[in-house]
Image (cartoon, helix red, strand yellow):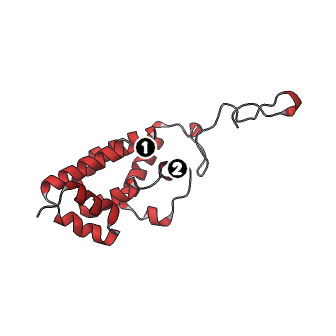
Amino acid sequence: MAMTIRNAWRSIVRLNPISSRSRAFSTIDEEERRQLVNRLLYRSKQRGFLELDLVLGKWTQENIHQLDDKHLESLIQVLDLENPDLWKWLTGQAEVPESITANPVFACIQKQISGNLENHAAVETRAKPGQPWVRGWDDFKKTGPNNAFLGNQ
């Protein structure tokens, strides 16, 4: 009996440990694989974090059809990461853990982002490595009466 996509998706992404996921990929038929690819595309484009939606969505759309089962598993691992951490790791604002650095999909996306930054963003507009990019309008912590801090800091 063929697995339903809901069962395939659960067994591949959520319930099985990583070692058994690769077996599950080989057991799904072409239609279930197409549905899985569509779900991964959706997850990469609809994360709720605009920058990641754009970066991951574009990369996934351009590359997902060339990914083998091992790389699909790596993509799932990347998509399972938390948005703020993933963004900081991809853009060099925080040091990447060793377990994430070993992921080939993460490495490829990070390389593309680094190349884009080098080609399209002046060095003086970027934060130093390991430092956050986003700064508030009141970073200098303006003070008001009685030396009280004003602003959102």
Q: Amino acid at mark 2?
A: Lys
Query: How many marks on residues?
Result: 2
Q: Position of residue 93 (x, y in %)?
A: 56, 50
* Vertical placement of residue 6 versus 41, above or below: below
Residue under label 1: 52
Q: Residues within 10 Å of mark 1 (few under 14, many from 20)?
A: some
Residue at the spot 74% in from the left edge and 35% down from the top edge: 140
* Vertical placement of residue 100 versus 49, above or below: below
User: Looking at the rendering, in which quadrant would you find the C terminus?
Assistant: top right
Q: Residues within 10 Å of mark 2 (few under 14, many from 20)?
A: some
Q: Tell me, yes or no, if residue 71 can be seen here.
A: no
Q: Amino acid at mark 1?
A: Leu
Q: Tell me, yes or no, if residue 37 can be seen here.
A: yes
* Vertical placement of residue 138 versus 84, above or below: above
The image's mark for residue 88 is: 2
Front-lying residue, 117 or 55: 55
Q: Position of residue 30 (x, y in %)?
A: 13, 55
